[in-house]
Amino acid sequence: MIYASGLNYGEKQEEMLEMDQMKYPYACYYRTLDTRFQSTVSWHWHKSIEIDYIMEGELVLTTPDQELTLRKGDICFINSGVLHSFSTDPQSDGCSFYAHLFRTSFLSGMHNSQIEQKYILPILGNRAVTVCHFPEGTPSNTAMTPIYLHIVELDQEQPFGYEFAVREELSRLWCMFFQETRSLHGGVRQKESADSRRVREMLQYIHEHYAEPVSLGDIAGAVGVSRQECMRCFRKYLRVSPISYLSEYRVRIAAGQLLHTDQSIITISENCGFSSNSYFSKVFHQTMGCTPKEYRQIQQESPHTQAVVSTTSQDV
């Protein structure tokens, strides 16, 4: 099934995927970034490997180390645990893309298998292989695209035994990816820096306490650093201030509640840590480009969203 949904986060600021609650460690997502609202996907990461394919428009993928512009037809691999965000040009018509997400155990089978040792571990967690971009028209992209789109078709139609077919096709993609990055597998792996680890821990604090009153001092204190050091780490890795990130995260959580619950806007505002409903509406409009009421109405009335959801079973 193809999921058309926003982001959900777990206790450790990882994106929680539908497959995290399933026994089938693979999911296909169809996502759109609309310049009217939700033109960005905030900073997040997940344990799964992510392989994106751009259907329309341009998508800007940002990590702490680089920024890539992905265009129609491009394919991009994002390694497990890589902190990243997405955005689209506000002056454009937005973008749409598919995302295959899967745990490497789906390909390798049992832990410590020969497949895991030989083909998975040289890539998994390798900080020299965080993001790999295959532009449309290149030989690698030309070989990968039919396989990628075949997986989308399998997931949509779900013929008998499609799980085996999806795994087979993902394995083919993985082997191509492995060959393309082979020169980077033998290098010395870099350990995560202290700053990067601090940012993850501060994000974890925000994600666990966003519903409470949270100050800059609280965020800094979560990892035992000064306010100035906290600001420096956020600016260096996320290019935003801690409080700006907190506000945006609260808005993203609120947006999810607006779509998936029938709670009042005032209740959602309180649940997400906003001090007043008027301030919530102001920050929500600054982030999403519309009021909470307009967002709920537009999303519920969107024919595209209804069409995608109607072809899938209910998200779990």
Image (spheres, rainbow, N blue to C red):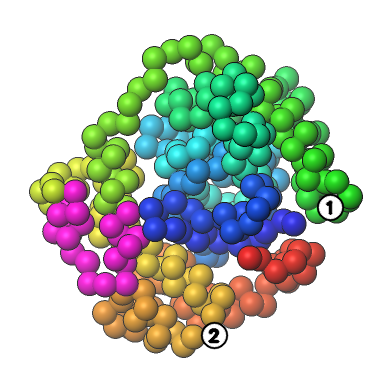
What residue is shown at x 56% (from left), y 75% (from top)?
A: 259
The residue carrying pointer 1 sits among few (fewer than 14), some (14 to 19) or many (20 or more) residues within 10 Å by Cα, namely: some
Q: Is mark 1 on a helix, strand or loop?
A: loop
Quarter holding the N terminus? Answer: bottom right
Q: What residue type is labelled 1?
A: Gln
Compared with residue 277, is residue 144 higher up or lower down, i.e. above or below? Answer: above
Q: Mark 2: few, some, or many residues within 10 Å (few <14, many ≥20)?
A: few
Q: Is residue 16 visible?
A: yes
Check residue 158 in the rendering and tell me which mark sits there, or answer none. Answer: 1
User: Is 221 in the magenta?
Assistant: yes
Residue 302 covered by magenta stretch: no
Residue drawn at 44 percent across, 51 percent down: 14
Indicate the quadrant where residue 163 lies: top right
Badge 2 amino acid: Asp
In the picture, the quarter occupied by the C terminus is: bottom right
- Please state the extent of the stretch shown in magenta in the rendering: 204-223
Instruction: Find residue 124 and report its horizontal and vertical position in percent.
Output: 51, 29
Pick the front one: 146 or 204: 204
- Residue 124 or residue 41, whichever sits in front: 124
Looking at the image, residue 121 lies above or below residue 87? above
Q: Say what secondary structure mark 2 lies in.
A: loop
Q: Position of residue 60 (x, y in %)?
A: 51, 42
At 46% from the left and 25% from the top, the residue drawn is 126
**316 lies left or right of 254:** right
